[in-house]
Amino acid sequence: MSDTATPVPKKWVVCPTCKGKSLYAASNAYRPFCCERCKNVDFGAWASASFSLPAEAPPDDLVFGDARLQ
């Protein structure tokens, strides 16, 4: 057996916020983001509901859930 380990190739991904290169590895505490700033920008968008999906409200007379449990 050899004591030398095969080096793991670096995996680069696109940062979801700035679209720059981001190292996807345990050494990057902000992965998949490239830096703390990009991570915080994304978190702020989620916190302000900027990422919400538009949806129509169901009718008031619609029964929710399993009708057998009503």
Image: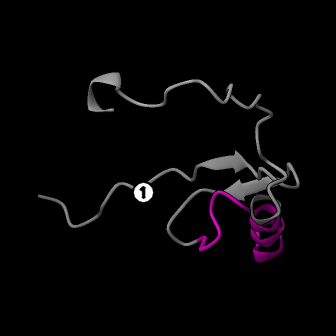
When asked about the image quadrant of residue 61, the answer is: top right
The quadrant the N terminus occupies is bottom left
Query: How was the colour assigned to the protein in this rendering?
Result: one colour
Task: Please tell me whether residue 2 belongs to the stretch shown in magenta.
Answer: no
Residue under the image location 78 percent in, 53 percent down: 21
Q: Can you say whether 33 is above or below 16 in the image?
A: below
Residue under the image location 62 percent in, 62 percent down: 31
Residue under the image location 68 percent in, 47 percent down: 13
When asked about the image quadrant of residue 42, the answer is: bottom right
Residue under the image location 68 percent in, 25 percent down: 59
Three-letter code, disc 1: Pro
Q: Can you say whether 12 is above or below 30 in the image?
A: above
Q: Residue furthest left?
A: 1
Front position in the image: 25 or 50: 50
Front position in the image: 3 or 63: 63
User: Residue at label 1?
Assistant: 7
Q: Can you say whether 41 is above or below 53 in the image?
A: below
When asked about the image quadrant of residue 56, the answer is: top right
SS type, badge 1: loop
Q: Which residues are magenta?
A: 28-44
